[in-house]
């Protein structure tokens, strides 16, 4: 009888055995380790993601500037896959300066050259008819991995092209090839015949 009453008291007691506590603690440690590794991985990749985002934002800004100037272009003087030379109207004078024209004065034609090397693109602005390579040059964008940036349509002599496509290829920080940012525009003044 004493054994039965002792057995009943033991079966009524609530709690965990030592083995149950050890299994639960082990599962908790494994779960916390998995969560910690996810957080550490996210923190490790954050700088790469930020750099990729900055490169894409800068490429889009430069691309927008290039297409805006090409759109106001009158004619393409020369072009290759890594360079385009065209005449466009600018709101400063002389060409290459930062002095803005008065509000009532018409824009002046300037010779603009966009040139892209394997890692960067630059812009040169000069007076039309000036010798190539002379003018105010500024580096616009770095971080590309190809100098194959420009393509022209219709296909044929570049000086007859009225559409320019600009494509920036940037290295992907995860090593899966290149990221592309692309846009194109027609030379509005050439298309309209001005």
Image (cartoon, rainbow, N blue to C red):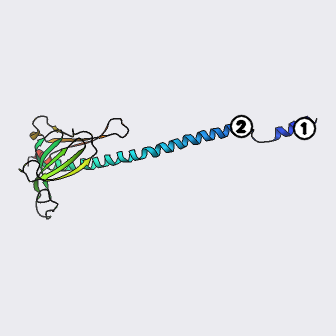
**Left/right of residue 159 with respect to residue 27 in the rendered view:** left
Q: Nearer the viewer, residue 156 or 123?
A: 123
- On the image, the x and y values in percent for residue 41 come to 47, 42
Q: Where is residue 179 in the image (x, y as percent from the top left)?
A: 31, 39
Work out whether residue 166 or residue 98 is closer to the camera in this orientation and state it: 98
Q: In this view, does 50 lie to the left or right of 80?
A: right
Q: Which quadrant holds the N terminus?
A: top right
Q: Mark 2 points at which residue?
A: 20
Q: Which residue lies furthest to the right in this view?
A: 1
Q: What element carries label 2?
A: helix
Residue with the mark numbered 1? 5
Q: Which residue is drawn at the image coordinates 55% and 40% (left, top)?
A: 34
Residue 36 in percent (x, y) is at 54, 43
- Of residues 77 and 96, the one nearer the viewer is 96
* Mark positioned earlier in the residue sequence (2 or 1): 1
Binning the other alpha carbons within 10 Å of mark 1 as few (below 14), some (14 to 19) or many (20 upward) gives: few
The answer to whether residue 95 is above or below residue 147 is below
At x 28%, y 45%, the residue is 143
Q: How far is disc 2 from disc 1 in space, using C-alphas?
A: 25 Å
């Amino acid at each position: 009888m004493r054994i039965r009453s002792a057995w009943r008291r033991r079966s009524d007691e609530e709690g965990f055995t030592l083995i149950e506590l050890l299994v639960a603690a082990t599962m908790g440690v494994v779960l916390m380790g998995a969560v910690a590794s996810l957080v550490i991985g996210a923190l490790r990749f954050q700088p790469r993601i930020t750099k990729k985002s900055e490169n894409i934002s800068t490429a889009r800004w430069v691309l927008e500037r290039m297409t805006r100037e090409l759109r106001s272009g009158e004619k393409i003087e020369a072009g290759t896959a890594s360079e385009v030379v065209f005449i466009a109207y600018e709101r400063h004078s002389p060409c290459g300066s930062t002095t803005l024209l008065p509000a009532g004065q018409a824009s002046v034609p300037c010779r603009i050259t966009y040139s892209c090397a394997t890692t960067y693109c630059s812009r040169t602005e000069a007076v039309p008819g000036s010798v190539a390579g002379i003018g105010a040059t500024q580096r616009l964008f770095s971080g590309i991995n190809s100098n194959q940036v420009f393509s022209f349509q219709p296909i044929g002599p570049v000086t007859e092209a009225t559409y320019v496509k600009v494509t920036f290829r940037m290295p992907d920080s995860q090593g899966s090839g290149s990221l592309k940012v692309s846009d194109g525009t027609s030379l509005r003044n050439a298309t309209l015949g001005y």
